[in-house]
Image (cartoon, coloured by chain):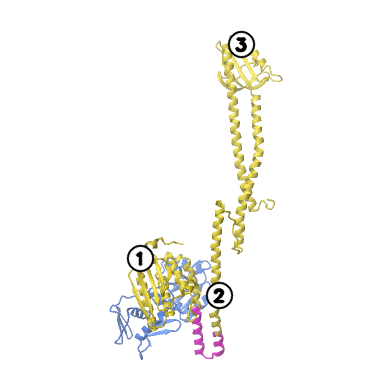
Amino acid sequence: MSSTSPTDPRARAIWRWGGAIAALLVVQSIILAGLFWLLAAHSHEREAEHGFARDCETFAALASPLRPATLRAMLTRDIHRDRFLAIFAADGSPIEGNVARLPHPATTGTKSFVAPIRATELPGKTHDVARLALCTLPDGEKLLTGVDLDDSEEALRVVRQSLLFALGPGILIALAFGLFAGRRAARQVDAIRRLTARIMSGSLEDRLPVSDRPDSFEQLCAHINAMLDRLQALVLDMRAVGDDIAHQLRTPLTRLRARLERSLRDTHDRAGFETAAIDALGEIDKLLGVVAAMLRIRELEDHARRSRFAPVDLAKIAADACELHRPIAEDRGIDLVCTIAPLPPFDGDDSLLIEALSNLIDNAMKFGPANGRVAVDLRRDGHHAVLSVTDDGAGVPVSDRLLVTQRFYRGSHEVDGVGLGLSLVKAIAELHGCTLAFASDRSCVSLVFASDRDNDKRPRH
Amino acid sequence: MTHILLVEDDHGTATEITLELTASGYDVTRCTTVAEGGRRALADGVDLLIVDRQLPDGEGLDLIGLLRDKGRRTPVLVLSALGSLDDRVRGLRAGGDDYLAKPFALVELIARVQALLRRPDDSRDTRLIAGPLDLDLLGVTGTRAGRPLDLLPRELKLLEYMVRRTGRIVTRSMLLQDVWGYNFEPNSNVVDVHMGRLRRKVDADGEAQLIRNVRGQGYVFDITD
């Protein structure tokens, strides 16, 4: 604590915790002491009343002439001089005893009351306060019996003092415990604070300690650790993407620069410049296409687009994709064969689905043999809808299956492209909760759509 | 003169757009904030708004909301660096008439501005005549100066789309979006191949070119030549 000043938030937390616990303990002690004090006072009063009742019975049983002597004997036995006893005639005049006259106010009966009295035999004082009872004896005489309150007050004061005395150390113990507990809690919170501070400064490597049998706080720590693992993976992925983009853009940018430089040096007429400018525009469009595709993949991986999902007709999408690609297939001498079975509507985004299918058809035409066959097949297979694109080529080698869906991976560098197609298809497939499957024996890529029933249960990330 | 209000805070982009629009014969006023844009858009004489989404004092879409609340039907083209389709949908839902994601080709911008300023006559005529062309939209047939054009249904739709926008550049993405109904950038020249076939059918050897390819930009249908 020496390192923390009261303005330090950590110290404030400790004091807040410590203070709260101490206050709780002090309030508890005061309630306890108060109860004890009340019970003690009550028991004292009851004890006195028992004595008074006994006195009344004793004197009622005695004949009137015997009473003064008995009373005197009782007073003599009272060596502490805390008893008051007196007999009064029916008219209130004193007969015998150590009280000069009847007190005011006075009630008759065994119920006790507290009143000032005029004492006659106390050394050094004539006035005192006593707990008294006044009973009327059978022949009309009255017996006043009582105890000095000094003594009982003294006893209660001792009780009070001992309680107060115990309260002091109690508060100290409470405060100490509170500070200890507060410091412990503050230390745990502080560990998280320090970690988040390091994260904010850019370091994602650190983790919070979690024991084998975690308490709820450590479970929170474990969750934070898991969150950090995910974050770190995402950041690494993002860095890799950044590197990829930089790398992918550098080559075409260099080419573009060289081309512009050359045209500036070698071109002297308008037509030449125009050609150079159009070429440059083409290159730039290609570059923008790469950037746009990257952004789209990222956007798709966010899974936020499901909000736009609507029932779509896969058969129409497949037919449209075939129709869209038929002329280009014919130009390349490729036989595009489409077999499309009608299917119930599926929740999805038609533009994205046709983009994925268009990519697959495009790949099949690019990587399959010239003058070959490309088959687009939409069919129902049990609970699933399967959309597959098959060509006559060798297909993706097994060793490359995982790689082809990664960004910028290109199976063949002889074919024009930047290697984003399949990773885009994969992102679109995942968004729709379908899997991208490669056939093992031929060149066939399939999108397997979950059944309509599963469609509703698709995990929403 | 057609008056276009451009609300764009990026100086470079605004300058490029202004130069291009001016060169195309439009009168352009520029402002940089939602507040100023709102004031000027509500003044008379604005035929079209081009609004950027991220402006220094707010969201460009709010400007459209303001305009629509006052009952103004001025067409609005929304520009945005937020290029995702979701944003496109949000932009159109907010009352924008078209949406263009940055970076865009200037020709695409001009094409869309033209399209917005002169909405095609969406007449329900089943017969469309333009110069030597005579299209029977119901019968899915067409002739050029009496010569039958052997058109596929999609080709007829493409031709109809072009004819209804005579004299204006139509870009590939406009064709894909409006004729096929899909919103994506194909990574091969599928649209060009379709257009190539259509052109060969419509413009036979020796005939005047009705459909012109504007290199790097799109296509124009014109009967003035």
For marks 2 and 3, give the CA distance.
120 Å
**Chain corresponding to yellow in the figure:** A
In the depicted view, which residue is nearer to us: B167 or A191? A191
Residue A352: tell me if it is visible.
yes
Q: Earlier in the sequence, mark 2 or mark 1?
A: 2
Dot 2 corresponds to which residue?
A246
On what subunit does the disc labeled 3 rest? A
| Label disc, if present, on residue A67 of the rendered structure | 3
**Callouts 2 and 1 close, C-beta under 8 Å:** no
Q: Chain B shown in which color?
A: blue
Q: Give the side of residue B52 with respect to residue A180, left or right.
A: left
**Callouts 2 and 3 close, C-beta under 8 Å:** no
Badge count: 3
Discs 3, 1: same chain: yes
What crowding class fits label 1: few (fewer than 14 Cα within 10 Å), some (14-19), or many (20 or more)? few
The residue range painted magenta reads A259-286
Callout 2 secondary element? helix
